[in-house]
Image (cartoon, rainbow, N blue to C red):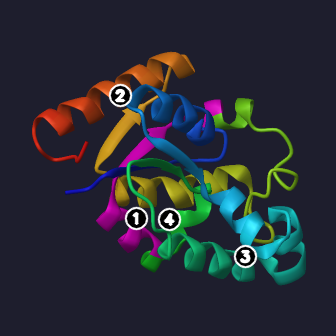
Amino acid sequence: MKSNITLIGMPASGKSTVGVLLAKRLGYSFVDTDLVIQEKTGKLLKEIIEEFGTEGFLKVEEQINSELDVRRSVIAPGGSVIYGPEAMKHLSEISTVVYLKLTYQDVKERLGDLKDRGVALKDGMTLLDLYEERVPLYEKYADITIDETGKTLGKTVDEARSVIEARIRDGLQEK
């Protein structure tokens, strides 16, 4: 059985915020893999992207996510983790994958400076291009999808918690 929960979704979908609140409510630990990457490399995400390019960053991200060894944790990887098949295979094996789904308009409204956030954008790619490229991948890897449209972060956390607790009751999720 899986003892972790991994939150996937676009930048600004609330993976970190929802993750911290969900971890508190479930009595789990919280792991932000962007911080793990920064800790292991000694560099900010935007510095890794500047130094090694988007492809280099994605390799670092995939390696670190595919080696993650945690239990009873809510894991919040970067939005680009879905480009790493090894990372997603590993995360799917150790956790229930929850997709925090936002409309393009909501993503656009919530996001500030993409480069400052360390968003892995290929040259010439717009936010809409990124959204359209990633959504099918989020849907492919998700065990559970939570549509955040019109919901506060608190409501999103409540819904995620009730779904996870139902999985625990049904024996699909380890306590």
N-terminal of the pair, mark 2 or mark 3, is: 3
Disc with the residue nearer the chain's start (4 vs 3): 3
Return the x and y of residue 5 as percentages of the image width and height: 39, 48
> Label 4 crowding class (10 Å Cα cut-off): few <14, some 14-19, many 20+?
many
Q: Nearer the viewer, mark 4 or mark 2?
A: 2
Q: Amino acid at mark 4?
A: Ile
Cα distance in 3D space between marks 1 and 3:
18 Å
- Circles 2 and 3: CB atoms closer than 8 Å: no
Q: Find residue 105 and report its horizontal and vertical position in percent.
A: 64, 32
Q: Residue at x 47, y 73 (%)?
A: 87
Q: Is residue 68 magenta?
A: no
Q: Amino acid at mark 3?
A: Phe
Q: x and y percent of residue 18 in the render? A: 54, 32
Q: CA distance from mark 1 to mark 4?
A: 10 Å
Mark closer to the chain start, 1 or 2: 1
Q: CA distance from mark 2 to mark 3?
A: 32 Å
**Which residue is more in the foreground, 147 or 81?**
81
**Residue type at mark 2?**
Arg
Determine crowd level at label 3: few under 14, some 14-19, many 20+ residues with C-alpha closer than 10 A.
many
Q: Nearer the viewer, residue 7 or 139?
A: 7
Residue shown at 28%/50% (left/top)?
Answer: 143
**Residue at the spot of label 2:** 161
Magenta part of the protein: which range?
Answer: 87-106
Give the distance between the C-alpha atoms of the residues marked 1 and 2, in whole angstroms: 19 Å
In the image, taking residue 40 as reference, residue 161 lies left or right, namely: left
Query: Can you say whether 73 is above or below 22 in the image?
Result: below
Residue marked by disc 3: 57
- Nearest to the observer: residue 132 or residue 42: 42
In x, y percent, where is residue 3? Answer: 30, 52
